[in-house]
Image (cartoon, rainbow, N blue to C red):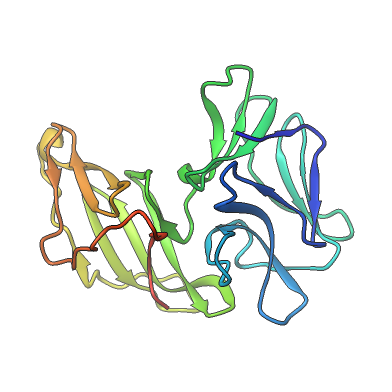
């Protein structure tokens, strides 16, 4: 994997940190024809440059903004140096990397483990090899080029996956319109991970090791020639 060293930085001039395969890029994604940018991860080999993760959806930034890797953090700043977002890992940073899975990671002294990763801080999409733990959420965007939190939310809590409408612009959550109903009073029989695997299948893993499929979801005819992601429509 290509390592990002301390003091490395990106601005809105188009430079990126690429995964070794060049399938994924980490950097500033321009919102349509505007002069506003997201710090994001996207599919870099396709013309659409589809975003799969972002940091500042509610607060897009102007030209001249910057993201920098320091010994303590990954920091997103506006042109005046005001901190807009930061990763806040628990221990010092040694390096970072954009992986071929689409996971951007910060590494500490033990390079075999990650002290922060985008996969553990999901925002928009579930893609192959991403595992959502209990308490995880995904949000729809508000519009095609507006990545503010939108009108729908995926919640994985209490052992069940639920899809809820949101009373935008408030964050009031209405009752779910879909549930996996995989909660069980016995925690070993309850869901604890939502898995998006390499074959584009999405399922819930229970603490006892059993898998709970989604029989009412359409199955994807998987081939290795395409990119896959699961996301909420807006």
* Front in this rendered view, residue 112 or 25: 25
User: Does 150 sit above or below residue 206?
Assistant: below
Is 15 placed above or below 98 here? below
From the top left corner, tell me how far across and down residue 81 is, in percent.
86, 53
Residue at the image position 33 percent from the left and 57 percent from the top? 155
Hey, which quadrant is residue 51 in on the image? bottom right
- Where is residue 198 drawn, in percent x and y? 32, 46
Q: Where in the figure is residue 233, as x and y percent of width and height? A: 39, 75
Which residue appears at 58% of the width and 71% of the height?
47
Q: Residue at x 48, y 57 (%)?
A: 123
50 horizontally vs 96: left or right? left
Q: How many marks?
A: 0
Nearer to me, 148 or 67: 67
Whole-percent x and y of residue 148? Answer: 56, 71
Between 174 and 1, which is closer to the camera in this rendering? 1
Residue 73 against residue 195 in the figure, above or below: above
Say which quarter of the image contains residue 217. Answer: bottom left
* Image quarter hosting the C terminus: bottom left
Where 205 falls versus 79 (above or below)? above
Query: Can I make out residue 198 in this image?
Result: yes
Q: Is residue 159 visible?
A: no
Q: Along the horizontal axis of the image, is 32 left or right of 184?
A: right
Residue at x-position 47% and y-position 61%: 124
Q: Residue furthest top?
A: 110
Specify the quadrant that holds the N terminus. Answer: top right
Left-right relation of 57 to 121: right
């Amino acid at each position: 994997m290509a390592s990002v060293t301390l003091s490395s930085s990106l601005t809105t001039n188009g430079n990126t940190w690429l995964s070794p395969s060049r399938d994924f890029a980490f950097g500033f994604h321009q919102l349509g024809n505007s002069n506003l940018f997201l710090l994001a991860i996207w599919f870099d080999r396709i013309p659409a440059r589809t975003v799969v993760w972002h940091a500042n959806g509610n607060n897009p930034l102007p030209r001249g903004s910057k993201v920098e890797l320091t010994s303590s953090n990954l920091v997103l700043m506006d042109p005046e140096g005001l901190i807009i977002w930061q990763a806040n890992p628990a221990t010092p940073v040694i390096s970072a990397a954009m992986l071929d899975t689409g996971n951007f990671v910060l590494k500490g002294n033990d390079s075999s483990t990650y002290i922060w990763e985008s996969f553990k801080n999901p925002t928009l999409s579930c893609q192959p090899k991403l595992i959502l733990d209990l308490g995880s959420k995904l949000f729809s965007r508000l519009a095609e080029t507006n990545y503010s939190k939108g009108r729908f939310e995926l919640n994985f809590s209490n052992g069940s996956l639920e899809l809820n409408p949101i009373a935008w612009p408030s964050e009031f959550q209405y009752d779910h319109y879909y549930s996996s109903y995989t909660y069980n009073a016995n925690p070993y029989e309850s869901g604890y991970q939502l898995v998006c695997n390499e074959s584009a299948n999405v399922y819930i893993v229970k603490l006892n090791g059993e898998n709970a499929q989604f029989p009412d979801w359409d199955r994807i005819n998987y081939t290795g020639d395409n990119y896959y992601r699961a996301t909420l429509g807006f």
